[in-house]
Image (cartoon, rainbow, N blue to C red):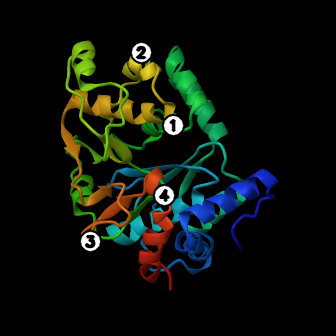
Amino acid sequence: MVAPIHSLTPGRAWYLLRRDFERGFRASWHDHVTTRQILTRLRNDLPTLEKTPTDLPSVHVLTGQEQWLMSAWMLASWLHATERSWSVWIHDDGTLDRQSCDELHRLFPGIHIIGRRDADLHMAPVLAGQPNAIAYRARHPLALKCFDIPAMATGDRFIILDSDILFFQYPHHILEWASNSDDVSIWFNQDPQEPSPLSDAECQERLGFRLWPQVNSGLCLLHQSAIHFNQFEDWLGLSSIRKGLDWRKEQTLLALGASQLNQGGMLPSTYEVSFESHSRADAIARHYIGAVRSQFYAEGVRRLRTTLLR
C-alpha cells in the first residue's frame, strides 16, 4: 500500500512547489522519497505496542493528515531509542482520513487512535460549564493537548510527544522518570525563546507563583496533579492569555499547571529545541520547530534511515 494520494488544487500545488524550492533539494528529496519508505520498509525488530496499559506511562500524540507520516517516523525512532513497549494513543486533530489511520494501525499494531468526533463526544460533559475552554478547544486543535490528552490518559502520569520530534539515542532521563511510578515531577523541552504571552511578573502578581521560563510542550512528561481544568478555564480568561496567539495558549496552560506544582523543570539541552541548521553532536532527541521544520527531513530522516529502514 502506498501513501494516501489526495487531489491537488492549483493553489495547493503552487504552495507545495514554493515550499520545496524554499527548503531545498535535500529536505524535499527525503520528504518525498525516504520518508515514505517507512510504509514498506519499517524494521520488524522494533518493540511492539501494548494493546492494554503497561506499568509505563501512556504516550500521546496529536496529529493530522499533514503530519501523520512525521508521526510514524517519530514513533519508530521513539520505539527504537527506548527499546520498550508502550501504550500509544493517537489523537486526531480532525483531519486524519481512514487510509492514514489504517496505515498507522498497520505500521504499529496495537496503537489506539481516537477520532475527533469521538473525542468531541467524550469531552462535551468533561468541559461542561467552562466556556473559555470549550471555545478554545473548538477554535484550535492544539487545545486537545491540554484537555483531551489529560482527560483520556490511562494513568496519573503520561507523556506527550509532538509529531516533529526524532530520537537519536537512548533517552535515559525519560526512561528513569517513566520507570519510577512514584515520581510526580513534570518535565518539558526548553524553548529557545519565551513563548508564553503571560509574563513571570504578571504570573506572580495575579496568580501568586513563578512561571517556569521557556516551556516548550513538544515533549512533556506530565502528572495529573498539574492538570486542573477549572484553573485552565480561569487562566484562559486572563487578558494577556486571551489576547495571545492561540497556538501558544496550550503550552502556557501546561506551563502554568507545572509551575504551580513546581516539581521538575526543563529536560537537558540534549533534548534539543533550537533554530540551528544542524543538531548538536550529542543530541538525544530534537524537536524540529517550525523555523527549522525542513531539517526534520534533510537532517533527521536522513540520519535515521540506516537504523529504521532495512
Q: Is residue 267 left or right of residue 58?
A: left
**Which residue is at 29% across, 40% downward?**
214
Structural distance between the alpha carbons of marks 2 and 4: 31 Å
Is residue 109 visible in the rendered image? The answer is: no
Residue at the image point whose x is 50% and y is 22% from the top? 133
- Residues at circles 2 and 1 in contact by the CB criterion of under 8 Å: no
Alpha-carbon span between mark 3 and mark 1:
33 Å
Q: Secondary structure at mark 3?
A: loop
First of labels 2, 1 by sequence position? 1
> What amino acid type should be assigned to the residue bearing mark 1?
Leu
Q: Which mark is residue 144?
A: 1
Instruction: State if disc 3 and disc 2 touch (CB < 8 Å).
Output: no
Q: Give the mark, 1 or 4, whose residue is nearer the N terminus.
A: 1
Q: CA distance from mark 1 to mark 4?
A: 22 Å
Circle nearer the N terminus (2, 3): 2
Say which amino acid is labelled 3: Ala
Residue 61 lies, in percent from the top left, at: 48, 50
Which residue, given by chain and number where applicable, does mark 4 sit on? 293
Label located before the other in sequence (3 or 1)? 1
Whole-percent x and y of residue 288? 42, 57
Residue 171 appears in the picture as rendered: yes
Residue under pointer 3: 281
Dot in front, 1 or 4:
4
Q: Is residue 280 above or below residue 237?
A: below
Quarter of the image with the N terminus is: bottom right
Residue furthest bottom as drawn: 310
Type of the residue with mark 4: Arg
Q: CA distance from mark 4 to mark 3?
A: 19 Å
Residue linked to disc 2 = 239
